[in-house]
Image (cartoon, grey):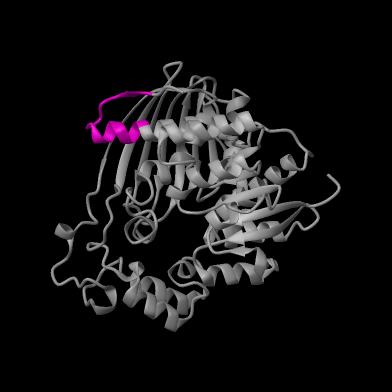
Amino acid sequence: MDRPITVAVAGCGSRGQDTYSRILMDMPEKARIVACADIDPEKLEGMRRLTGVPENACYASAEEMLAQPRLADVMLICTPDRCHYAEAKEALLKDYDLLLEKPIAPYADQCKELSDLATSRGRKVAVCHVLRYTPFYQKIKQLLDAGTIGRVVNIQAMEQVCYWHQAHSFVRGNWRNSDLSSCMILQKCCHDMDILLWLTGKHCRYVSSFGSLSLFRPDQAPEGAAERCVDCHVDCPYNAVKYYLDEFHRTGDEWPQNVVAFEPTEEKLLTALREGPYGRCVYHCDNNVVDHQVVNLELEDGATVNFTMTAFTAHGGRTLRVGGTMGELYCDMKQNVIRVMRYGQEDEVIDVRKLADDFSGHGGGDVRLVHEFIDLVRGETEMSPTLTAIDRSVESHLVALGAEESRLSHGKPVMVTA
């Protein structure tokens, strides 16, 4: 293609504006943002300033933008979970190619419908499973595909959500309530279900799960805890004033403060903590998603996977232990280290930090995902095994939704059928 492809962005929050749009702005020879939409006027104005999109191409909602004739080659859908299905369906019917934030949709039938629609319309739809693009997981994939540890028999994986991230996103934040977004194991961990299936190259036959909301409930509140942190004198690791305002003064970092208040200042943060959801006591919110969950997968050849998602860690990150017939891998994403332990041989330690220069944005995954998708739409590359086309992504969603069904049935195994 001899011109930049055009892009419309639905949702101008952390992912739509601060991540994907900034990446696109750094590749003007390949892509140009020509329209955007958000229900928050302040975020929409920030997007207009960032991208230079004219005011008449800035829309007050994704629905308003989708009501127009086709505006661009590609649409990025970065709106809340419950909006994805209707917006993606309308965009496909208007023949946009899509970069779609996960999850595809909160229900299995909606996921399958969008996948079938993309196929019937001949549209390119990639789901943002950014972990596939990290140097960390790509190296693990390379080792497994090369047979370094023989046939994979068992995997133990953990996502350490971390105590403060759980409070920010899943107690006070946008994904706190499954009735408003989607269940925790789908929203947070369809990434993990996808990466585990991709690494093994196998399909899942059965899934079972246990988990619950153990801590972030009114009956667990410390004595004397106030409804809002600005009024509270309890010494608490989840204190919003300490986390958002004090950290803002100490580091000047924008995220996650810019989620609490767009283009944050001390005054705006204080107002948000007094009036908005992020200033609430973590024991007195309208959250209902789990704070810990274990998931077991039986794969098609009898291999097994045990996955744990937990809020109860001091630090975030993912770890992975892969047991094979000829050796074992132990992998720590936070440290970017992979230990290869071939049976009867000396261990080999791989420092992933020496394999790439850019580890920004989900361990380097964000930038690589956007570049490969844009190259695909431009016709400069074919659909690679790495890029998560929507038909490939559906299985990860079915596994996650099966896990939630099992959890609600106290661990009853659920068959996963495509």
Q: Residue at x 24, y 79 (%)?
A: 231
> Of 346 and 169, which appears nearest the observer?
169
Q: Residue at x 46, y 76 (%)?
A: 248
Residue 394 in the figure: left or right of residue 400: right
Q: Which residue is drawn at 65% across and 72% down?
A: 49
Residue 364 percent location from the top left of the image: 61, 51
**Is residue 289 on the magenta stretch?**
no
Residue 158 percent location from the top left of the image: 40, 41
Residue 121 in the figure: left or right of residue 225: right
Residue 230 falls in image quadrant: bottom left
Residue 65 percent location from the top left of the image: 59, 56
**Is residue 403 on the magenta stretch?**
yes
Residue 400 falls in image quadrant: top left
Residue 304 falls in image quadrant: top left
For the magenta stretch, what is the residue range?
402-415
Is residue 351 visible from the viewing direction of this image? no
> Of 110 and 321, which appears nearest the observer?
110
Q: Residue at x 35, y 75 (%)?
A: 273
Is residue 105 visible from the viewing direction of this image? yes
Count of marks placed on residues: 0
Most distant residue in the top direction: 301
Residue 153 in the figure: left or right of residue 296: right
Q: Is residue 142 above or below residue 293?
A: above
In which quadrant is the N terminus drawn?
A: top right
> Of 265 and 303, which appears nearest the observer?
265
Residue 47 percent location from the top left of the image: 61, 67
